[in-house]
Image (tube, rainbow, N blue to C red):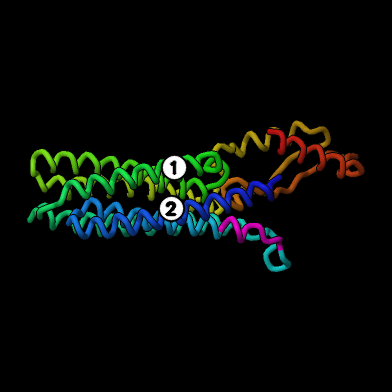
Amino acid sequence: MSENIDIERMGIFKIAIGLTVFIFFAELIAGYLTNSLALLSDSAHVFMDAFALTLSWFAIYICSFPPTEKRTYGWHRIEVFAAFINGATLLFISVFIFYKAYLRIISPEHVESMGMLIVAVIGFIANIIVAFWLKDFSHEDLNVRSAYLHIVWDALASIGVIIGAVIIYYTGWFVIDPLISIGIGFIIISGALRIVKEATHILLEGVPAGIDIQRVVEDIKTINGVSSIHSLHIWSLCSNIYAMSAHIDLESGAMENQTDIIARINEKLAKK
């Protein structure tokens, strides 16, 4: 079942990557021809979308590799690295966008609004299609969610470009172009920081969000035969696979039932 889902995800990612790369080149060329910084900024974001989708596809592929003697947990942590790289590169891109927007605000340049509008609409439609494909899988792991958020943010950025193109067409207010670029930059930063924070938390082996260690301790203590628990550690291999280790002291006379006790502990942990 899981293998079929991974195959389906990889197929969707391949199609999404191809469509995103096409939109990147379309916006890059149109941005150059129309002299639109907003469109060029969006093309940079679309490039990062393609990069994010490619990393996500690679992560799904490599995570299917079985564990080895040197990597007993397998390759699941790759997805976290991919998400971290996605977020970090987006932060870098946003700084560049702010710099270029600053120069355009000081000295506004003519923008061909109609071409800007047409390409932005095409980009928005493409982003909506890709986001729809990825939505069902975005709840399953951080890596797919980071790629999905890339696409959603870019769809929002495309709306901004569309609005900017309409305003420029009717008013000739060219400064709106770099202002839209700044808005795109803030959209990028807000999501990128969230992804970097979550990925860093996993890489530093922090306790997964939503898990209360004290409740885990109390639940384990409710098992008959358990005396106390210490040296408890809970961490994430990736966004949807958790691990735990602990030393559990048994009550006097319960040692002969330790196999059964461990089985009941695992059952309760898995259930709750």
The answer to whether marks 2 and 1 mark residues whose Cβ atoms lie closer than 8 Å is: yes
* Location of residue 255 in the rendering, given as x and y in whole percent from the top left corner: 88, 44
> What residue is pinned by disc 2?
19
SS label for mark 1:
helix
As drawn, is 256 to the left or to the right of 57?
right
Q: Is residue 63 part of the magenta span, yes or no? A: yes
Q: Which amino acid does label 1 sit on?
A: Ile
Which residue occupies the extreme bottom position in the image?
70
Query: Looking at the figure, which quarter contains the N terminus?
Result: top right
* Location of residue 10 in the rendering, given as x and y in whole percent from the top left corner: 58, 53
- Name the residue rendered at 68%, 48% in the picture: 4
* Location of residue 153 in the rendering, given as x and y in whole percent from the top left corner: 36, 44
Whether residue 244 appears in this view of the structure is no
Q: Give the range drawn in magenta.
A: 59-67
> What residue is pinned by disc 1?
129
Look at the picture and state if 34 lies above or below 171.
below
* Location of residue 224 in the rendering, given as x and y in whole percent from the top left corner: 82, 32
- Decide which of 33, 103 is in the foreground and name it: 33
